[in-house]
Image: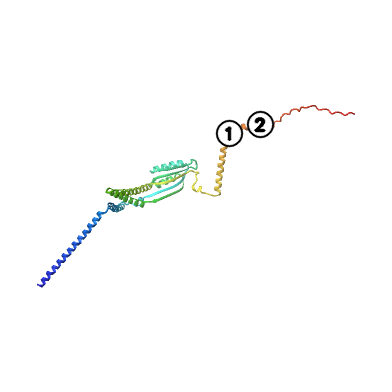
Amino acid sequence: MTTIGAGMDGRAGRRRGALLAATALTATLAMVGCGAGDSGSRDSAASAPERAVAEGGAADKNSGADAQGAAGAGAPDLRVDQRAIIYTGAMRVQVTDVDAAARQVSTVVTAAGGFIGGDVRRSADADAEAELQLRVPAAKFAGVVEEIAKLGRQQSRDINTQDVTEETVDLEARIISQRARVDSARRLLARATSIADLVSLENELGRREADLASLEAKKRRLADLTALSTITVSLAGPAAKTSDEENETGFLVGLRGGWKAFVASMTILVTVLGALLPWLVAFGVPVMVLLLVLRRRRKTPALTAPVSGPPPVPAARSAP
């Protein structure tokens, strides 16, 4: 009997312990529910601009993650033949006829699918020069340079390349992210409920759209530079000076310059005399004839007239 009583007492104790544990768990859940209710009420009391900023930040984070994922998924092929490279070149070619060579350059560029971006001519004599700005497709850059070099004697060539592949990929990712930020700002603007929220969100939307337009302009500029290369071609006549010759100094250079100045001065003097010669013949000859006549008249002796007066009186003789 004692053993049965002890067993019954043990089961009763376990039941009471389970009941106490259930009661404690119920109280804890009730407290948690109250805390959640309080936090919900605080969240509902938050102002509309704060909610908009919070939603905008979450949307920006999500759009940034989406942009990074899209950029990683759509990354371009970075092989050598697929890289974005800007080609620029400058060359100087001495030719016999500058105008004819310029026409040939235009033909070469047009056949390659490019165009003439600028054309400056100086003089039309043997020292004539022409400077042409060429825009040609990047794939035809090397071929056009070689064709132009064959037009005469190449005096100089300067080719530069700039790899902008990484910059292009980064710019594309920034554009995707900025477009997502613009879309999120537009959604928030559509849900604005007060004038203050409306003004604030409109300003933010304008700033984001301006940043997006700037990024897209940079992308178009890079696309233009990578698609069409720039070549500056200087065509020089047989007597045109190079930049090295223009910077030369020394006795022989001075002597050569002095001789050229003397010849130029004599040429000017002869030109002036040739212009004055008809006037000298027309007016100088009559003037010379008149001067000779006057001079001869001054040298002719004048006829002298006899001097009139009383006859001479004979001398009186003295008496003897």
Q: Tell me: 195 left or right of 247.
A: left
Q: Which residue is mark 1?
A: 279
Question: How would you rate the neighbour count of disc 1 (Cα within 10 Å): few for under 14, some for 14-19, many for 20 or more?
Answer: few
State the residue at coordinates (60%, 32%): 283
Q: Is residue 9 above or below residue 66?
A: below
Q: Tell me: 132 left or right of 297.
A: left
Disc number lying in front (2 or 1): 2
Element under label 1?
helix
Work out which quarter of the rendered image holds the C terminus and state it.
top right
Q: Is residue 23 visible?
A: yes
Residue most extreme to the left: 1
Q: Is residue 76 visible?
A: no
Earlier in the chain: of badge 2 and badge 1, it is 1
Q: Which residue is mark 2?
A: 294
Image location of residue 115, percent across then percent down: 40, 43
Give the amino acid at mark 2: Leu
Image location of residue 191, percent across then percent down: 27, 49
